[in-house]
Amino acid sequence: MAKKRTTKKSPGRKKAPAKTSAKKPATKSKSVAERDERTSARLTTLADGIVKSAMSGREPKVEVPTRSAGNTKWNKSRGILQMGSGTQERQLFNLGQARKFMQTLLHGEGIKKLIGEGKTQSLRGMYYQGLHDIMGTKEKTFNDQTESDAILEDLEVTIGALREELHVFAKKRGTMVGNITVIDSGDTIDCRRMGSGGYAIPSICEPDVIQFDSVEADFVLHVEKDTVWQRFNEDKFWRDYNCILTEGSGQPTRGVRRMLHRLNKEHGLPIICLLDCDPWGHYIYSVIKQGSISLAFESERLAIPEAKFMGIRSSDYQRCDLSDDVKITLNDRDITRAKQIAEYPWFADNKPWQKEIQGMLKNGFKMEVEGLITKDISYVTETYVPERLAAEDWLG
């Protein structure tokens, strides 16, 4: 896999058509129109149920699936986390639930309006769209955006719709470059020609927005942070080793995870992760591979059970003859988190992963991928990763 490969020069762009004086309004595809109609109908059904309860003298309430560890199940045969059947009620006349009841309906109304107008809104925009003083009080509808975001996720699972179907998107975070051409909202983008900045992976990567025009890579190398991604891009690693290079700026967003998932499932590309040797790098890998508790309802379109963890590894301090400068002492929080991760069911019975986590704890220090620069500025791209690829040296 580590054999270098030089790709053919991409064909030049075709001459752009002349602009017309009148811009035609965008039209929905049949599948998108049907999706919007379905989502809108579910919101209406939710509201109608509340109205019927009130009109019949019963307390209005909303039943919301529980997004918690206790309602999350590990499906060993499929290798993903899945949401259980547990639910919780939000009652209008319950003082402990009335606020969330109000917030749920408020965002439901805002989403129905977005769908009706054929527009989208950011998570931040949704927060402000629903923000106002509650009549007769000095309280606001939302204390902060975190509260607003949680309600939107509750709405997703309550009506069985993805965030994209709610016309809501998150802030873009994550970058891609390499041997792939995508069509993003009708625009053809050659990711070989994105310069030093790369292609910003959007928060919505569904097939009706992003299509793959050509995928000529052999694998995807996903790195944790932009600083490492920049080194790989500058050294043109993706060209020499025929791959796609992505980064998630730490914990990858849904958009990045969805992009990786689609490349793996639709094109069979192996997803190889180069992350830090610390509990947070291990957790990032866990989320990419199995899914997360808070988003267990989306595991089937986000989790990649076949994803591999290349490193950096606890044994690399000695194996790569690194200096003491790379050592970052584990604090109490790191140790506690590492022990929690070791008990995850998908790691608990995995001997190589138990050895890896225990090795880090025994070392008493963590390491970042950037620490490899102490060997040489391009050690990670010219030696470390090529040798791991050639040996297929990774954890699964």
Image (cartoon, rainbow, N blue to C red):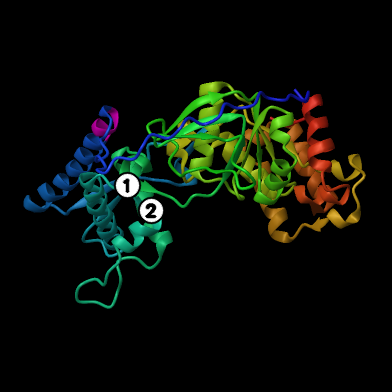
Reading the image, the residue beneath label 1 is 155
Disc on res. 122: 2
Numbered disc 1: secondary structure:
helix
Which residue is pictured at 79% across the width and 47% down the height? 360
Q: Position of residue 170 (x, y in %)?
A: 44, 50
Residue 171 in the figure: left or right of residue 358: left
**Towards the viewer: 223 or 278:** 223
264 up-or-down from 347: above or below:
above
Mark 2 neighbour class, 10 Å CA radius: few under 14, some 14 to 19, many 20 or more: some
Q: Nearer the viewer, mark 1 or mark 2?
A: 2
Q: Quadrant of residue 42?
A: top left
Magenta segment, prevailing SS (helix, strand or loop): helix
Residue 339 visible in the snapshot: no
Q: Amino acid at mark 1?
A: Leu
Residue 239 in the figure: left or right of residue 303: right
Q: Earlier in the sequence, mark 1 or mark 2?
A: 2
Q: In the image, is residue 129 part of the stretch drawn in magenta?
A: no
* Range covered by the magenta-colored residues: 31-35
How many numbered marks have been drawn onto this rendered protein structure? 2
Q: Amino acid at mark 2?
A: Ser
Numbered disc 2: secondary structure:
strand
Disc on res. 384: none
Mark 1 neighbour class, 10 Å CA radius: few under 14, some 14 to 19, many 20 or more: many
Q: Quadrant of the C terminus?
A: top right
Residue 211 in the figure: left or right of residue 240: left
**Towards the viewer: 109 or 357:** 109
Q: Position of residue 71 (x, y in %)?
A: 44, 41
